[in-house]
Image (cartoon, rainbow, N blue to C red):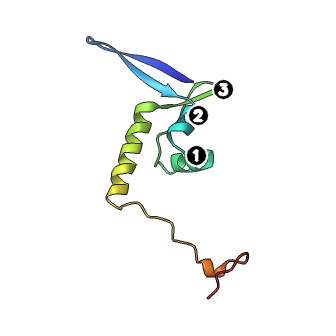
Amino acid sequence: MATDVSTATSGSGTRSRRTIRRGELRRIVPLADTTIYELEQRGEFPRRFNLTARCVVWDLEEVETWLDERRRASDAAQINKAPSPDVRQRRARPVRQ
């Protein structure tokens, strides 16, 4: 469920910012909760904030900006990829040579 938070700007009217809860965040960013939490702790993912004592949300614009930055970094091959596993070390179904 998304939440709209309006912030007033002086003189020119109001600006509406959209916030998202965990369910919608998980649909947008297909990472595990622990991965998102670890990225937040390292400052590599937009920080969540509390609307109430039991409601945590993220700023949708910040999340979309983060995704755009990740896409650009991926296109520029700046993201370190995990090494391919050595299939010769598998115990189940070892590779025959």
User: Mark 1 against mark 2, which lies toward the viewer?
Assistant: 2
Q: Is tag 1's residue or tag 2's residue first in the polypeptide sequence? A: 2
Residue 58: image location, x then y, percent:
50, 32
Q: Is tag 1's residue or tag 3's residue first in the polypeptide sequence? A: 1
Secondary structure of the residue carrying numbered label 3? loop
Q: Which residue is mark 1?
A: 37
Residue 88: image location, x then y, percent:
62, 82
Q: Which residue is mark 2?
A: 22
Q: What separation in Å lies between label 1 and label 2 (alpha carbons)?
A: 11 Å
Most foreground residue, 9 or 88: 88
Rate crowding at label 3 as few (under 14), some (14 to 19) or many (20 or more) other CA atoms within 10 Å.
Answer: few
Please tell me which residue is depicted at 46% across the width and 64% down the height of the picture.
Answer: 81
Secondary structure of the residue carrying numbered label 1? helix
Residue type (three-letter) at the residue carrying disc 3: Arg
Question: Which numbered circle lies on residue 14?
Answer: none
Rate crowding at label 2 as few (under 14), some (14 to 19) or many (20 or more) other CA atoms within 10 Å.
Answer: some
CB contact under 8 Å: marks 2 and 3 = no
Most foreground residue, 44 or 61: 61
Please tell me which residue is depicted at 36% across the width and 47% down the height of the picture.
Answer: 69
Residue type (three-letter) at the residue carrying disc 1: Tyr
Please tell me which residue is depicted at 64% across the width and 25% down the height of the picture.
Answer: 53
Single out the residue that lies furthest toward the left: 12
Please determine whether, in this image, residue 91 is positioned above or below residue 34: below
Please tell me which residue is depicted at 45% across the width and 31% down the height of the picture.
Answer: 60
Please determine whether, in this image, residue 52 is positioned above or below residue 32: above
Secondary structure of the residue carrying numbered label 2? helix
Q: Is tag 2's residue or tag 3's residue first in the polypeptide sequence? A: 2
Looking at the figure, which quarter contains the C terminus?
bottom right
Please determine whether, in this image, residue 5 is positioned above or below residue 26: above
Q: Which residue is mark 3?
A: 54
Most foreground residue, 65 or 53: 65
